Amino acid sequence: MDKIRQFGYQMNSRMAQFMYGRNGFDNLAKICNGIAILLLVINIFAQSRVVYLLWLAFFAYSCFRVYSRNIPKRYAENQKFMSMTEIPRKRAKLLKLQWRDRSVSRYYICKSCHQQIRVPKGKGKIEIRCPKCGERFIRRT
Ligand SMILES: [Zn+2]
């Protein structure tokens, strides 16, 4: 039992040594890895060469990011990717919240400052005031 545990520790520290000075799983690597897994599952059914090549590309790129030693460059790419996808990611998050709280609340985005505003549902037509910038707008809840 102790030997197994010792072996586990050794593997962990070796892994840590190996990963030292490497980029690791950043958001972009995680997303590429997620897409790769999805493509792999799709290809169980599709058995298509195109899907296979796409899988290979996403898988290779996520590995490249994880093991890359050029951390500043990978960091800059990741930041760029995150800022480019900020609006769709925010929207997806909002949809998720909207769905989770669909029986009690509604969510709106302030048009002038993009602040997310939560309003109780079923109040009819009301004036909503943005808590961040004070912008007012009328919505049916
Ligand atoms: Zn606002």
Image: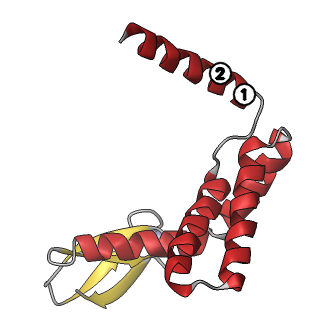
Q: Nearer the viewer, residue 110 or 82?
A: 82
Q: Which mark is residue 18?
A: 1
- Quarter of the image with the C terminus is bottom left
Whether 83 is drawn above or below 125: the answer is above
Q: Mark 2 — residue? A: 14
Instruction: Identify the residue shown where x is 17% and y is 80%.
Output: 121
Instruction: Identify the image quadrant of residue 79.
Output: bottom right
Q: CB of residue at label 1: within 8 Å of ligand 1?
A: no
Residue type marked 2: Arg
Q: Nearer the viewer, residue 124 or 91?
A: 91
Q: Position of residue 40 (x, y in %)?
A: 56, 70
Instruction: Identify the image quadrant of residue 5.
Output: top left
Q: CB of residue at label 2: within 8 Å of ligand 1?
A: no
Left or right of 26, for residue 74: right
Instruction: Identify the residue shown where x is 48% and y is 75%.
Output: 91
Q: Position of residue 98 (x, y in %)?
A: 30, 75
Q: How is the image coloured?
A: secondary structure
- Quarter of the image with the N terminus is top left
Within 10 Å of disc 2 (Cα), the crowding (few <14, some 14-19, many 20+) is few
Q: Nearer the viewer, residue 12 or 2?
A: 2
Judging from the image, what secondary structure is the residue with disc 2 in?
A: helix
Mark 2 to mark 1 CA distance (whole Å): 6 Å
